[in-house]
Image (cartoon, rainbow, N blue to C red):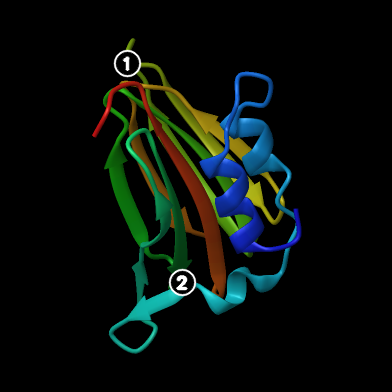
Amino acid sequence: MKTIPLLRNALHDVTRTRSPHDIFRSYRGTDWKDYVQYSYGGKYCYPHVLWQNDSMELVIMGWADKQTYHTYTNYNTIYSRVLQGALFFDEINADKTRTTWFMQESSFLKIYPFSIITMTAARPTVASLHLFTYSYQK
């Protein structure tokens, strides 16, 4: 998949034979740079929803150096990909186990439900793409 619009269309047409995760992993485009947004003059990450339906959201994030973002997965699964730079992912899962990952460009990560996640930009000019899949209708 070469563009964000093609990725959005493919996610919209998810079938039983192809999972959202497989579609998400197939994105290999560089047009994501047209969608990254920053607030406060590029000093802070600004999540931007690229597409959503009742059970999924595709979000792109631009990061400032050493910036941190916290989220709770509740009933959803998050698929993450680092597009540029590197991120630290710190997860505390449902059984209170703590895991930390260092992810560089083109790395993928699946974060399971009932986790507490802290993401931190490890370098300047970082961007990431995330697919939130919900087990319930929003």
> Residue 108 appears at what percent x and percent y?
64, 40
Q: Nearer the viewer, residue 108 or 23?
A: 23
Mark 1 Cα within 10 Å, few/some/many (few <14, many 20+)? few
> Residue 40 appears at what percent x and percent y?
28, 85
Pointer 1 or 2: first along the chain: 2
Q: Quadrant of the C terminus?
A: top left
Question: What amino acid type should be assigned to the residue bearing mark 1?
Answer: Lys
Mark 2 Cα within 10 Å, few/some/many (few <14, many 20+)? some
Question: What amino acid type should be assigned to the residue bearing mark 2?
Answer: Asp
Residue lying at the far bottom in this picture: please name it: 41
Q: Secondary structure at mark 1?
A: loop
Q: Secondary structure at mark 2?
A: loop
As drawn, 34 above or below 114: below
> Residue 29 appears at what percent x and percent y?
73, 63
Q: Residue at x 60, y 75 (%)?
A: 33
Q: Residue at x 34, y 68 (%)?
A: 46
Residue that label 2 marks: 65
Q: Residue at x 34, y 26 (%)?
A: 115
The answer to whether any part of residue 123 appears in the image is no
As drawn, 11 above or below 86: above
**Which mark identifies residue 47?**
none
Q: Quadrant of residue 44?
A: bottom left
Q: Quadrant of residue 90?
A: top left
Residue that label 1 marks: 96
